[in-house]
Image (cartoon, grey):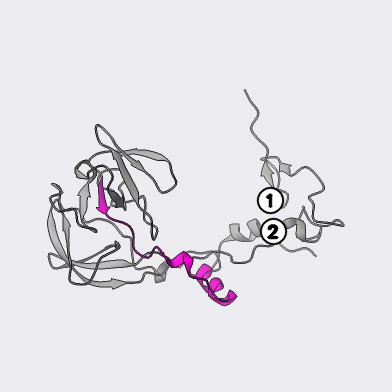
Amino acid sequence: MGKQLRQQRRGKGGAVYRNPGHRQIGNIRYPNVDAGTGKIVDLIHAPGRSGPLAKIDFSGENVLMIAAEGMVVGKNVTYDMSASDLSPGNVVPLSSVPEGSYVYNVEGQPGDGGKFVRTAGTSATVVSRGDKVVLLMPSGSFKAFDPRCRASLGVVAGGGQREKPFGKAGNKFHAYRSRSKAYLKVKGVAMNPVNHPHGGGGHPHVGKPSTVGRNAPPGRKVGRLSPKRRK
């Protein structure tokens, strides 16, 4: 008897594919303040995140934010709407950031707390300012933002983590598991016919058109969805 396809098993959910939210530290957002200065009290690791976090004592309240390269315990971090201090880690509006500066954790809309450029070692470059602030994203594309959107100055810390080899398969297994991602993925063409529609044959090949209809049953919907008919 054949086994379930991977997408069928994933669709059921369960503990294997559920996000381990109980180990997450929390949603990392900018506080809703206009100005102020906080002090870094600790740099911590967050499971499921590639970059470290900085715990900041801000007016008697501990605030978590994504750490920048060069942050150290005891340093001050400023939330400044006038952007008088352009030190790494400070939070400023994009309208006040000079061209050519590096920013990260950029808000998509003013006040949403930060949505873009949050991975370790990444940064966006301010290209131009005007009615919209244009950033060169890590992907190489240009994206326009509202000048009132806030961003942190500098580059996200922890950029060298991908250069370090895992060393053994177990380390990579646990790294994927912490993000609820499957480590091993067997190709459908390498399976038997009872296990996958692409399986079987004297050598690894699909053996039939790999496009399937959008109304195909779950056990058949593998490969590429057929394009919509042009109207």
Q: Is residue 194 left or right of residue 76?
A: right
**Residue at (15% x, 49% y) in the render:** 83
Looking at the image, tell me whether mark 2 or mark 1 is earlier in sequence order: 2
**Is residue 108 shown to the viewer in this render?**
no
- Percent x, y of residue 137: 39, 45
Q: Is residue 24 left or right of residue 133?
A: right
The amino acid on which the numbered mark 2 sits, given as a three-letter code, is: Leu
Q: Is residue 152 magenta?
A: yes
Which sits in the foreground, 90 or 160?
160
Which of the 4 image quarters holds residue 226? top right
Do the CB atoms of the residues marked 2 and 1 lie less than 8 Å apart? yes
Per the image, label 2 sits on a secondary structure element best described as loop
Q: Residue furthest front?
A: 100
Kindly identify which numbered label has been placed on residue 218.
Answer: 1
Magenta part of the protein: which range? 150-178
Residue assigned mark 2: 5
**Is residue 61 shown to the viewer in this render?**
yes
